[in-house]
Image: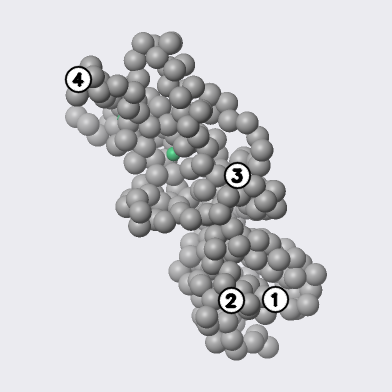
Amino acid sequence: MPPSPTSNQSNPPWSRDELVLALDLYLRHRGGLPGKNHPEVEALSQSLNLIGNATGVSKNQSFRNTNGVYMKLNNFRRWDPSYTNSGRTGLAKGNKDEELVWLEFANNPERLAEVVAAINANVESGTTTPINLNEEEEPGFFEAEEGKVLTRVHRVRERDKKLVKHKKDEALKKHGELKCEACGFNFSKTYGADIEGIIDIHHTKPLHTLQPGDKTKLTDLALLCANCHRVVHSRRKWLSVAEVKARYQTNRL
Ligand SMILES: [Zn+2]
Ligand SMILES: [Zn+2]
């Protein structure tokens, strides 16, 4: 019998990262879910606490304890056709992201495995600086499907001051100007020659390939105007530079 769904009330809702890791454990034990004391349940509880510490949300002692993990595994059952097809319903309580994470990852085990590995690698490395991605701070910026941890790594890399400078210097040397790789916008041509050096840097590597400690190459970075960069991050499934470029070309006329 699943435990009472009210036993974990004071903890924050599960983030995408957490749901992705839990889904991975769920799918590996789909036929018979592990009990609260199963080593993998304990291991997941520990990983979630690492993420919780990095994101500053693990204030409660019961944060993602084995009971909470066990309950979340039971929550996933209601999205699982192999369970519900036999007329069973699973535990009803849960949040909306649960279903989205299920839809995005449950039928794509390879992608799930890659994202899980990348989240774990970045969390366990301990190099994840405290995550404080305040989504309200930047309206229209969507945390990626892959969750907070990897979103944060992306943001930190594309805001690295030294790299940003190198990338701009390289472009100026090569092309004599800074212009958006998606729409061609050039700030100084549009607003005056004294408006120099303005362009956003976007990190193009897929989030699941972000390993702690690897070096960002200049070729991993793209120059984007503020609008196009905004468009890239304007939905949960981030757009590629090529996709933004194609959209710009089709829609601007
Ligand atoms: Zn642009
Ligand atoms: Zn970006």
**Which label lies toward us, 1 or 3?**
1
Q: As shown in the figure, which amino acid type bears the numbered disc 3?
A: His
Would residue 17 be found to the left or right of residue 159 on screen? Answer: right
Q: Nearer the viewer, mark 3 or mark 4?
A: 4
User: Pointer 1: what residue?
Assistant: 66
| N-terminal-most mark, 1 or 4 | 1
Of labels 3 and 2, earlier in sequence is: 2
Gap between marks 1 and 3 measured at Cα: 27 Å
The span from disc 1 to disc 4 (Cα, nearest Å) is: 60 Å
Say whether mark 1 is within 8 Å of ligand 2.
Answer: no
Observer-side mark, 3 or 2, equals: 2
Give the quarter of the figure containing the N terminus: bottom right
Residue at numbered disc 2: 60
Residue type at the position of mark 1 = Thr
Which percent across, then down, holds residue 77? Answer: 60, 74
Label 3, label 4: how far apart the Cα atoms are: 40 Å
Q: Badge 4: few (under 14), some or many (20 or more) residues near its Cα, within 10 Å?
A: few
Q: For mark 3, what is the residue?
A: 208
Figure check: 207 above or below 191: below
**Residue denoted by label 4:** 192
Circle 2 packing at 10 Å, graded few (<14), some (14-19), many (20+), is few
Q: Is mark 2 on a helix, strand or loop?
A: loop
